[in-house]
Amino acid sequence: MSCISTQTPIKPSCEAIIDLFPDPFVIIDRNFQIVSCNQQYKNHYQVGNEDIVGKYCYNVSHRIDHPCSQNGEHCPLEEIIKTGKPTNVMHIHSTHGHDEHVQISAAPIHDNEGNVLYMGETIHPLPQTNNKDQILLGCSTATLRMVSILYRVAPTHSTVFLLGESGVGKDCAARYIHQHSERSLSPFIVVDCGALGENLIESELFGYEKGAFTGADKTKMGLFEAANHGTLFIDEIGELPLNLQTKLLRVLETGTIRRIGGTKYINVDVRIIAATNRDPQEMLKDRSFRQDLYYRLNAFPVTVPPLRDRKADIPDLAEFFLSTISDSDNQLPLSPDVIEKLLSYNYPGNIRELRNLIERSVIMAGSKTISPDDIIFENPNGLLNTSMADQIKTKPLTHDATRTSRLSTEQVITALDQCNGHRTKAAQLLGVSERTIYRHIEKQKSEHYLIKKQKLKSI
């Protein structure tokens, strides 16, 4: 008698297979309709099959009635249908009453002839941080693109070269890379080449042995050693002298350093992130920067956009800076007319200038609420002309109250109704930040709870 079964093996269903995926995962057809989702997706977003399957992806994820590409975001489905290749993108999903930054990894599902039938989409929710130093805020297209690039390079071992004007937040971009890398629990060390002299830079980076020079009365560990297994952020690397550029190149190629006055080489495992506000090509032309070091650093260049190219982020950034100032709670949220004035400026000094401007406005306002008269710009040349200012003004509600006074909860509810509950659109309609909308929502919830509690007491 044979013991071999003659029954046809039962093949696992699509749902059973995708339930094995550790992250939220959905399958979407060419018409933007979700045809399946895994258990991780339902667990994360606290929904059932009936809330997802058959619905349009943009309805579920963005609470809008049209593809996200019409809102200025990069649509992975449209990209996959066009190219037939996998893609990655950063999105903001509206879930649980708040917005969540997610990294999407999407791939095509083909038929036997190679045509794209569906898209498989893995969703990686990004960790939220309350770190006061973290100011990669905002949902402008420029910011989302940059954060998407940083998120992709963070878990790799690549050297990153951050480019951008002074004050755009290159240090925050470097910290973001470190926080989202495998080195996040190890040191993040910063050295600013523009603030140190040549001799001091060398001793800071490489350290020195006792007796190496006059005043070296003990051995000192350098920043490369201090950053071992972590990340060393070298800011304003364009100011690094040529002889130290040679030493830095040697470290990048060999993974070893030698202290000043020392004879032995020390192994270091350090990821380098470099930054400059100068034009690298100009530095190469005037021979102030070694070409071989440039190509070694330029393995993964990232440009941090200036604030004038991400104006939609100004309300969030302004209220963030305001929240970091002691005793400024009475100033939140900023009124629409203050936001409008903040948007009328080009910020030559970028985010650093905006931060200084907010601190100055708090001082000027004193004990009263910040008004447009308290917003004093440093550089009149940064003011936009009338036509440009008109282009960036936010659309007010039909009544004048939003332009002349602080928002009421009723105005926020009206704006949310007009925007089908979409917080980002409601904020744009009112000319305020999304944080302002969120505060009013939370205030309404608290008032509703207190009223309900009072009613229960009276029964």
Image (cartoon, grey):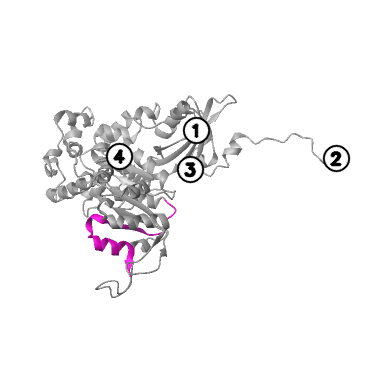
Disc 1 to disc 3, C-alpha distance: 13 Å
Q: Nearer the viewer, residue 210 or 228?
A: 210
4 or 3: tag closer to the N-terminus: 3
* Location of residue 450 in the rendering, given as x and y in whole percent from the top left corner: 33, 46
Which badge, 4 or 2, is on the more N-terminal residue? 2
Between residues 52 and 216, which one lies in front from this camera angle? 216
Q: Residue at label 2?
A: 2
For residue 434, which numbered disc appears in the image?
4
Residue 204 sits inside the magenta stretch: yes
Would you name the residue on which mark 1 appears?
A: 52
Q: Quadrant of the C terminus?
A: top left
Ranked by sequence position, the earlier of labels 2 and 1 is 2
Where disc 4 sits, the SS reads helix
Q: How crowded is mark 1: few (under 14 residues within 10 Å), some or many (20 or more)?
A: many
Viewer can see residue 142: yes
Residue 122 vs residue 330: left or right? right
**From what the image shows, is residue 40 above or below residue 27?**
below
Residue behind mark 3:
44
Earlier in the chain: of badge 3 and badge 2, it is 2
| Secondary-structure class at tag 1 | helix
At numbered mark 2, what does the secondary structure look like: helix, strand or loop?
loop
Residue 356 in magenta? no
Check disc 3 and report its element: helix, strand or loop: helix
Say what amino acid the circle numbered 2 marks. Ser
The reply to whether discs 4 and 3 touch (Cβ–Cβ < 8 Å) is no
Extreme residue toward the right, this view: 1
Q: For residue 109, which quarter of the picture?
A: top right
Segment colored magenta: 181-208
